[in-house]
């Protein structure tokens, strides 16, 4: 398997859906399928926080969601859990600054997709050196979904990265909705990443479709 190209990565980041069982009001399997029908381009399994599954339950859910992604040819990324990603032969891993180092993860996962959360220019530059395929920048807006989220920083860092001539694929995350997604793309982001905007929507397909249309119109 060859390493993903930046052009391919840019396309996959258009509408990046992140979800775990505790982010949904209905079965996560149903939410994911509806979100895919609405136009998501990438999925990250993030089973963290209060009420989340662990052990065999977590593995079973991951397998079920991965199977849905495979059925629709949507890449399946695992948050943080490198061993689970390898066991499932997932398409990639996303890590935060408090997880294992990106360089170590890259060595373990080979050419699979590697995403890194970054909050400043220094972390972006290190992510590039360590072999990241993309960076998640945020939180852009205030969010209650991630219990350990940093203070919202808007799109300033995205603009700064692009002004420096850095072309690493970037996705904005944190409090993004149909109403406020546009500034992320206009500032230089390649896409938006959402959790609750889709996972808690009354109609995940419709909400995903709205977000996808906004991104596609601006890119």
Image (cartoon, rainbow, N blue to C red):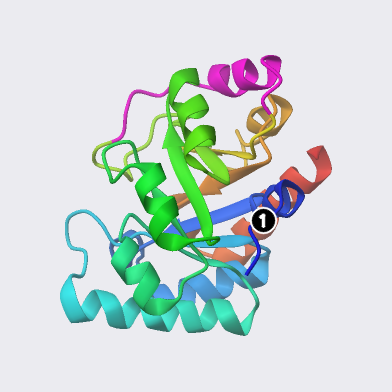
Q: Is residue 191 above or below residue 52?
A: above
Instruction: Return the residue at label 1.
Output: 12
Q: Is residue 30 magenta?
A: no
Mark 1: secondary structure: helix
Q: Nearer the viewer, residue 218 or 123?
A: 123
Which quadrant, please, contains the N terminus? bottom right
Q: Name above or below for residue 27 compared with residue 193.
A: below
Q: Nearer the viewer, residue 170 or 176?
A: 170
Please tell me whether residue 80 is drawn above or below residue 143 in the rendered image: below
Residue 28 vs residue 170, the one in the foreground: 170
Residue pictured at 62% horizontal, 58% vertical: 208
Give the residue at the far front of this rendering: 107
The magenta segment is: 149-166
Assess whether residue 151 is covered by the magenta stretch. yes
Residue 60: image x %, image y %?
A: 30, 83
Determine if residue 137 is in view: no
In the picture provided, is 10 more to the left or to the right than 92? right
210 on left or right of 207: right
Point 32% across, 28% down: residue: 150
Image quadrant in which the C terminus is located: top right
Percent from the top left, x then y, of residue 160?
Answer: 61, 15
Q: Is residue 19 visible?
A: yes
Q: Position of residue 91 (x, y in %)?
A: 52, 67
**Residue 44: percent from the left, percent from the top?**
46, 60
Answer with left or right where residue 99 lies relative to residue 174: left
The one nearer the camera, 190 or 215, is 190
Q: Residues within 10 Å of mark 1 (few under 14, many from 20)?
A: many
């Amino acid at each position: 398997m060859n390493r993903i190209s930046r052009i391919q990565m840019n396309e996959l980041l258009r509408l990046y859906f992140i979800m775990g069982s505790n982010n949904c009001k209905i079965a996560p399997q149903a939410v994911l399928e509806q979100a895919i029908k609405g136009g998501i381009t990438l999925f990250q399994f993030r089973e963290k926080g209060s009420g989340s599954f662990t052990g065999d339950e977590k593995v079973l859910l991951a397998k079920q969601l991965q199977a849905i992604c495979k059925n629709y040819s949507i890449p399946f990324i695992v948050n943080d859990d490198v061993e689970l990603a390898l066991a499932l032969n997932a398409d990639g891993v996303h890590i935060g600054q408090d997880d294992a180092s990106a360089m170590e993860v890259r060595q373990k996962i080979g050419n699979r997709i590697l995403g890194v959360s970054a909050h400043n220019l220094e972390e972006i530059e290190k992510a590039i050196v360590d072999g990241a395929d993309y960076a998640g920048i945020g939180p852009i807006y205030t969010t209650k979904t991630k219990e350990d989220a940093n203070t919202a920083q808007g799109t300033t860092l995205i603009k700064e990265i692009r002004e420096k001539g850095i072309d690493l694929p970037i996705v904005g995350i944190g409090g993004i909705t149909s109403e406020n997604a546009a500034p992320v793309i206009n500032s230089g982001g390649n896409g938006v990443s959402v959790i609750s905007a889709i996972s808690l929507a009354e109609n995940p397909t419709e909400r995903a479709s709205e977000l996808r249309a906004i991104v596609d119109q601006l890119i």
